[in-house]
Amino acid sequence: MTEERQLLRETVAALIDKHASPAAVREAMASERGFDESLWQLLCEQVGAAALVVPEEMGGAGGELADAAVVLEELGKALVPTPLLGTTLTELALLAADQPDAEALEGLAEGTRLGAVVFDPGYVVNGDVADVVIAADGDRLTRWTSFTAERVDTMDPTRRLARIEPQNAADVGADPGLADTAAILLAAEQIGAASRCLDLTVQYTKDRVQFGRPIGSFQALKHRMADLFVAVQSARAVVDDALAEPSATSAALARVTASEAFSKVAAEAVQMHGGIAITWEHDIQLYFKRAHGSAQLLGPPREHLRRLEPEVL
């Protein structure tokens, strides 16, 4: 990781630590727009989070996909609801056009406008708060210049989803593989959430005393947590490879491994925390819901496995 990217990670982590406590996250996810608008403004103004993938000549930071992934990973650790994923993908879609909409890109890069990309009209991330909506079907990109949006209640309250229907649309250009890019960025977010979920579990086993000993000292739990650590780090390596060399294959691998690792960690976290983990007051249940919600977003793991079949047959 470059020095600049590490500084970006540390800056985002500091903002989250200061402004996105578990209580603040719960308040944000229950708000009218589904995210903390003041934190979003800070991320855009102090970090340039929404401008990372936009070229400098269009008002952006001129960064790379891996820069956006670093921010999403840090946000994923605390389950912070933001419109960053949809906005970043919308920018990449507009940049793929023969004639990019400079005005829209400027607004998205500033964070004053929000973006959403439609892969499934029934479940669009931040679709009900988006100003710029792009639909991707793997062949062409279409901009929905007018549309209706309705929030959809889902299992994961930290991820705002909506059902969108187009009213007017205009062709943008060829789809550069936006679904693969989305899969890689989502996998990076999953790695962040999985690593924090594991950290919380390890800390709990150090604090929870049973039979006069911290339960984390029991050999059986040590082995289980070691296995979880290996799963997360292995998945992280796959996601890093996908960021370094994005392709349909690397994207599918990243999604499968990240989904499996996060789901495994979340399930074990519930087991090790015991009954408290499934109470509304405890945050582990939110990680469990995010794990399963994210695994189904952009297509379940089995669909990505089917895409990998030609590589092994």
Image (spheres, grey):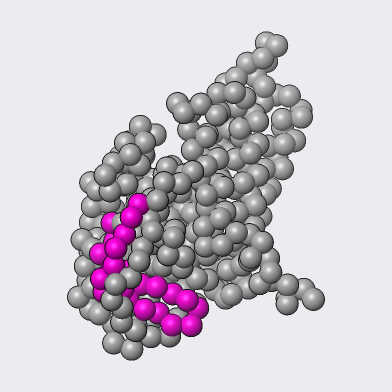
Magenta region, main secondary structure: strand
Residue 147 visible in rendering = yes
Residue 86: quarter of image = bottom left
- Tell whether position 130 is magenta: yes
Judge left or right: residue 125 versus residue 288: left
Tell me residue 13's x, y (percent).
39, 46
Tell me residue 71's x, y (percent).
40, 56
- Tell whether position 135 is magenta: yes
Which residue is at the far bottom? Answer: 98
Q: Nearer the viewer, residue 10 or 304?
A: 304
* Residue at the image position 60 percent from the left and 63 percent from the top: 254
Q: In the image, is residue 120 above or below residue 283?
A: below
* Residue at the image position 57 percent from the left and 21 percent from the top: 207
Tell me residue 7's x, y (percent).
38, 55
Q: Nearer the viewer, residue 120 or 312?
A: 120
Residue 167: quarter of image = bottom left
Quadrant of the image containing the C terminus = bottom right
Q: Nearer the viewer, residue 11 or 210?
A: 210
Q: Nearer the viewer, residue 3 or 194?
A: 194
Q: In the image, is residue 10 above or below residue 288?
A: below
Q: In the image, is residue 259 above or below residue 284?
A: below
* Residue at the image position 63 percent from the left and 66 percent from the top: 304
Residue 7 visible in rendering = no
Q: How many marks?
A: 0
Tell me residue 301's x, y (percent).
63, 59
Judge left or right: residue 34 versus residue 122: left
Q: In the image, is residue 161 above or below residue 223?
A: below
Query: Which residues lie in the magenta part?
Result: 129-151
Which residue is at the far top? Answer: 212
